[in-house]
């Protein structure tokens, strides 16, 4: 009889334990599902906050989508680079300290790479210089070259952010270029033609160009035009690619790809 009672008690205990295990398993599943749902909601919120216009353009068609895309261009959206952009792997993880470009007959230009390991992960507002800092990196090159004052990308990025030129999640507003030039006492001229670019470079000025999708970027990207050769080829200082900075470029190609990014005041500014 005692054995029968003991067996029954053990069976009941095993059943309770099984029910407890099932409850714990279900509770764990519910907690995990809730956590995953929360993470998905956070990711969606971040996306909507950083790229709302890109999402809106995806929902629209025809003239409405074109209007949104033009607004993005006009106000400096989509200047971000990633692993699929040309030159990203080439430039990342290295230091370019002391690099100066200056071919024969060309004035020396201080070069800064936004992907330089010294500051690629430094902040540009809520983003990083390495992914979104082409604008500040270009103006750091321009100011350091034309004024003799050393202003590296982190300092320029901080100044740009504090003065409202950072477009969170998308790079810089176009107004960064004339704004930074004025702050450092440099004259700036916008709305340049192809001949204006050649003339400015021949006179020793630098030209900042906003490029659209093409040879320099898959989205939007600021570069510095630093000189013109005797054959009329354009020399550049691309903050995302030392390799492209060492090549000679056809003026027609640069003008064509930059015109696609034309917006308020752009896409070329002669400085100096």
Image (cartoon, helix red, strand yellow):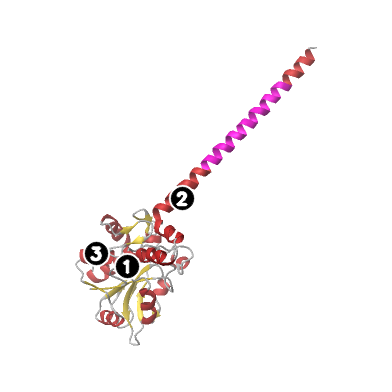
Label 1 or label 2, whichever comes before in sequence order = 2
Q: Which residue lies under the disc numbered 3?
A: 179
Q: Which residue lies under the disc numbered 2?
A: 44
**Residue 104's x, y, as percent?**
32, 82
SS type, badge 2: helix
Q: Nearer the viewer, residue 230 or 76?
A: 76
Q: Is residue 7 visible?
A: yes
Q: Residue furthest top?
A: 1
Asked if 219 appears above or below 200 in the picture, the reply is above
Highlighted magenta segment, given as a residue range: 11-35
Q: Quadrant of residue 79?
A: bottom left
Observer-side mark, 1 or 2, equals 2
Asked if 86 appears above or below 127 in the picture, the reply is below
Label 1, label 3: how far apart the Cα atoms are: 13 Å
Q: Is residue 95 visible?
A: no
Image quadrant containing the N terminus: top right
SS type, badge 1: helix
SS type, badge 3: helix
Q: Nearer the viewer, residue 70 or 5?
A: 70
Label 2, label 3: how far apart the Cα atoms are: 33 Å
- Please check the rendered image and state whether residue 26 is part of the magenta-colored stretch, yes or no: yes
Q: Residue furthest left?
A: 185
Observer-side mark, 1 or 3, equals 3
Q: Quadrant of residue 57?
A: bottom left
Label 2 or label 3, whichever comes before in sequence order = 2
Label 1, label 2: how far apart the Cα atoms are: 32 Å
């Amino acid at each position: 009889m005692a054995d029968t009672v003991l067996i029954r008690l053990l069976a009941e205990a095993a059943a309770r334990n099984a029910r407890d295990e099932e409850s714990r398993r279900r509770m764990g599943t519910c907690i995990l599902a809730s956590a995953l749902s929360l993470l998905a909601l956070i990711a969606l919120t971040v996306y909507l906050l950083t790229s709302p216009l890109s999402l809106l353009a995806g929902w629209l068609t025809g003239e409405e989508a074109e209007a949104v895309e033009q607004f993005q261009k006009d106000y400096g959206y989509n200047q971000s680079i990633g692993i699929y952009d040309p030159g990203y792997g080439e430039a990342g993880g290295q230091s370019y300290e002391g690099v100066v470009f200056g071919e024969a007959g060309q004035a020396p230009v201080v070069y800064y790479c936004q992907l330089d390991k010294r500051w690629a992960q430094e902040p540009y507002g809520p983003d990083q210089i390495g992914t979104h800092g082409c604008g500040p990196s270009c103006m750091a090159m321009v100011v350091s070259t034309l004024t003799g004052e050393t202003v590296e990308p982190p300092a320029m990025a901080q100044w740009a952010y504090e003065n409202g030129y950072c477009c969170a999640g998308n790079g810089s507003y176009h107004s960064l270029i004339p704004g930074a030039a004025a702050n450092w006492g440099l004259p700036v001229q916008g709305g340049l033609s192809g001949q204006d670019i050649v003339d400015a470079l021949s006179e020793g000025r630098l030209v900042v160009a906003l490029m659209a999708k093409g040879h320099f970027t898959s989205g939007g990207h600021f570069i510095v035009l630093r000189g013109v050769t005797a054959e009329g080829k354009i020399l550049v200082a691309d903050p995302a690619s030392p390799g492209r900075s060492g090549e000679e470029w056809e003026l027609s190609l640069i003008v064509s790809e930059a015109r696609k990014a034309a917006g308020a005041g752009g896409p070329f500014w002669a400085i100096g």
